[in-house]
Amino acid sequence: MPPHLSADRPAPQPPERDAVDVLIDQTLRLRGDVDAVRRDTVLIDEDDPQLLWQRALCELAVHHLDDLGAHLGQLKEGLPPGDAEQLAEEPEAAQEKPFDEPQPGSLLSRVGSAEWNLLTDEVSWSDELFQIFGRSPQAGPLSLDELPSVLFPEDQPLLTSLVTACLVDGKPIDGEFRILRADGRMRTLHMMGEPVLDADGCTASMWAVLRDVSELRRSQRMVGRTRESIRRHQHMAQTERRMAVELQETVLPPWRGSLRLPQQGPGALDVASHYLPSDSSALIGGDWYDALELPDGRTLLTVGDLTGHGIPATTAMAMLLGALRGMAVAGIEPGALMGHLNQLLQSSAQPALGSAVCCRFDPATGTLAWSQAGHPAPLLFRNGAGRPLPPPDGVLLGAASGVAYEQDEVHLLPGDVLVLHTDGLTRRSDRGAGPEALLGLAPRFAEARTAQECVRTVVEEFGGTERLDDACVLVARIGA
């Protein structure tokens, strides 16, 4: 295609070939890097919106770089042979070539050029443009009057507006429309054109470059869909978290600060507790804690944890904690109580696994009867030293049917501190699982005057660092 005199600027000079080679080399290297990232995102979880978003962005970047590489390649090669022949004063008849559909993924076939001469009614298309339109060169190019016939009806007014602006008003055009090829395939084309002026400054013809941006637009739509999917996913996650928090706050004990149980009589427990949310999960887990005065004057102490997060976990936790409270009020022993909870989880419509510890303290005798189901044992602190209580046998709740849970007893003394916690408290990224970190707080517990001071000590030690799971801690200090 010959260089044209633009309506508003002279034709630019071609760049140096060395500079184009450098740009091509840089583009190829960047294309390879992006493609390597794209290959890593091929085998992904289709349900993960974040990974779908990453893959869509990689696809979009690859298409952009492909187009850039194609343009730089054309810039380096100069005018196509068919266009160069048109520069001759007496062009020879070009040999007709059989029409060939471009191969999938072909880069140079994505960009073609055309000129519509208003004075002679001649139309010239590059070979690439015939390929883009899926049209045989033997059929000839489409005139400006014929061009709208291959467009989608809703896009035809846009083309008419663009052509009118170019030919009548002498303005450069830049627009996008969709065509329906003879083979039934829809393609999206981006057209940029300018009026070509004659010596008197009148519009003699219209010259345009058309680029097939179908794959690019497909990638952009994928990016848009994944962006919207992520927004919906985030909204649903925020809604689920809010509902889970509200449910958890409704089920867990409403008291804050220290609680005296039973409220009357000697040997009462000074009880305090705290819930620590996870730093690595946006959802609330199934952890619970509870302290409850029983009708016979004894006190129930319990903590537990169910697998999972969000509404399913908090719903199952609410069911389990409600059943535990009811059986404890009915006077069922801790060991038998654990067996009933295990059976409840086994028969639940949404099976889950859980760990728990259930204690019943008698202030009249100072006896603590307790049972556990795959849960960290309570820690007993006495005279500035701490140790875990030897655990009775008990498997995870929901893990097996028909199992029996042992029950043990320990005698507590005035001034003893009993710490119940879920395993998320000590399972942190900067230290291994286990009670060692909690046992190291024994000197500070010995100096504390209330259970609430002990809880504050635990929060100071464990609340400001990364934690892999939600956690609960309940501290009971035996009074005189």
Image (cartoon, rainbow, N blue to C red):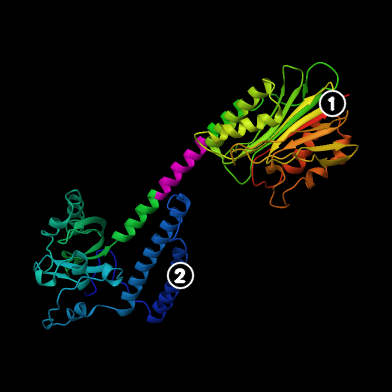
* Amino acid found under the numbered disc labelled 1: Gly
Where are the magenta residues, as a range? 226-240
Q: How dense is the environment of label 1, judged by Cα within 10 Å: few (below 14), some, or many (20 and up)?
A: some
Q: Nearer the viewer, mark 1 or mark 2?
A: 1
Q: Which residue is mark 2?
A: 30
Query: Residue 332: x percent and y percent?
Result: 68, 24
Q: Nearer the viewer, residue 277 or 345?
A: 345
Relative to 415, residue 18 above or below? below
The residue that appears at 23% across and 55% down in the rendered structure is: 177
Q: Is residue 428 left or right of residue 91?
A: right
Q: How dense is the environment of label 2, judged by Cα within 10 Å: few (below 14), some, or many (20 and up)?
A: some
Relative to 440, residue 33 above or below? below
Relative to 65, residue 163 above or below? above
Query: Residue 422: x percent and y percent?
Result: 69, 39
Please state, as top left, top right, bottom left or bottom right, where the C terminus lies in the image. Answer: top right
Q: Which residue is mark 1?
A: 366
Query: Residue 29: x percent and y percent?
Result: 45, 73
